[in-house]
Amino acid sequence: DRSIRGIPELKDVLIYDDGDLLTLVNKYHGVAPDYEPGNLVEVDFTMAAWDDIKVKKETYDAYKEMYEAAQQQGYDICICSGYRTYEYQQELFEGNLADHGEEYTYMFSAYPGRSEHHTGLAIDITSPSMDWALSQDFADYPEGQWLDEHCQDYGFILRYPKGKEDITGYGYEPWHFRYVGKDVAKEIMSKGITFEEYLGEA
């Protein structure tokens, strides 16, 4: 399926991390199988759903700031996914295909090499109130609403908004946030646009 809702042909492949916070990885722009981001650090277990979640240091510093602000205001959030290897993304993708079929998988699971999680700049966030699950209901929970309103203050954007499926190629994911830095995040979120639109790639 070559449409944006399927798996279109790649336009380019990133071989190494050049440190650009605005690197675009999506269905058209991939990374090489051995791509690994620089500055990977492990997320402290108090802020994560389990051990050994890694993200880029810039992402982590911003997340810590956001996590502490959320805690102070009574919201309990935690990272349940950060950096993913090509192999791990392949396992997830194949598992989704087996469990949910093509149509769902293409909209909610990135083909290996095309996941933002390869960059170390993307995180999935959940909460104990959600029983650590990832679902679209997160938008109706206080934590999900708080993140939607405040993520840009810490340099994050909601990466796959509702109604933008034909631009992002993915379904609405109120749990998936991407670090882009505060100025860019505020512009994207205030305009209600996608990262693709911001970069002129839509």
Image (cartoon, rainbow, N blue to C red):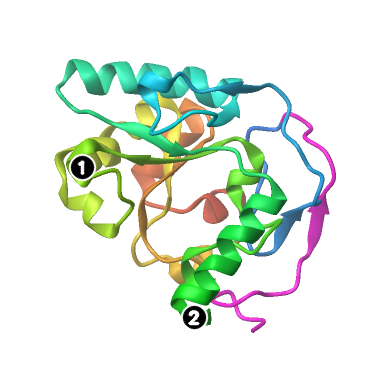
Q: Quadrant of the N terminus?
A: bottom right
Q: Residue 101: give its label.
A: 2
Residue placed farthest to the bottom in the image? 1
Q: Amino acid at mark 2?
A: Gly
Residue 88 placed where, x, y %? 64, 51
Labels 1 & 2 near each other (Cβ < 8 A): no
Task: Examine the structure image and report whether residue 128 is included in the region drawn in magenta.
Answer: no
Range drawn in magenta? 1-19
Q: Secondary structure at mark 2?
A: loop
How far apart are the alpha carbons under marks 1 and 2? Answer: 30 Å
Whether residue 63 sits left or right of residue 146 in the image: it is right
Q: Indicate whether 188 appears above or below 183.
A: below
* Residue that label 1 marks: 145
Q: Indicate whether 22 appears above or below 10.
A: above
Viewer-side label of 1, 2: 2
Mark 1 or 2 closer to N-term? 2
> For the residue carrying disc 2, how many other residues have a C-alpha within 10 Å: few (<14), some (14-19), or many (20+)?
few
Q: Write the residue at 16% across / 51% down.
A: 140
147 or 40, which is in the foreground? 40
Q: Amino acid at mark 1?
A: Gln
197 or 47, which is in the foreground? 47
Task: Examine the structure image and report whether residue 18 is included in the region drawn in magenta.
Answer: yes
Specify the quadrant of the image occupied by residue 148: top left
Q: Write the residue at 77% across / 35% down.
A: 17
Residue 82 placed where, x, y %? 53, 37
What type of secondary structure mainly makes up the magenta span? loop
Q: Secondary structure at mark 1?
A: helix
Specify the quadrant of the image occupied by residue 196: bottom right
Can residue 22 be spotted in the picture? no
> For the residue carrying disc 1, how many other residues have a C-alpha within 10 Å: few (<14), some (14-19), or many (20+)?
some
Residue placed farthest to the right in the image? 15
Q: Indicate whether 69 appears above or below 82.
A: above
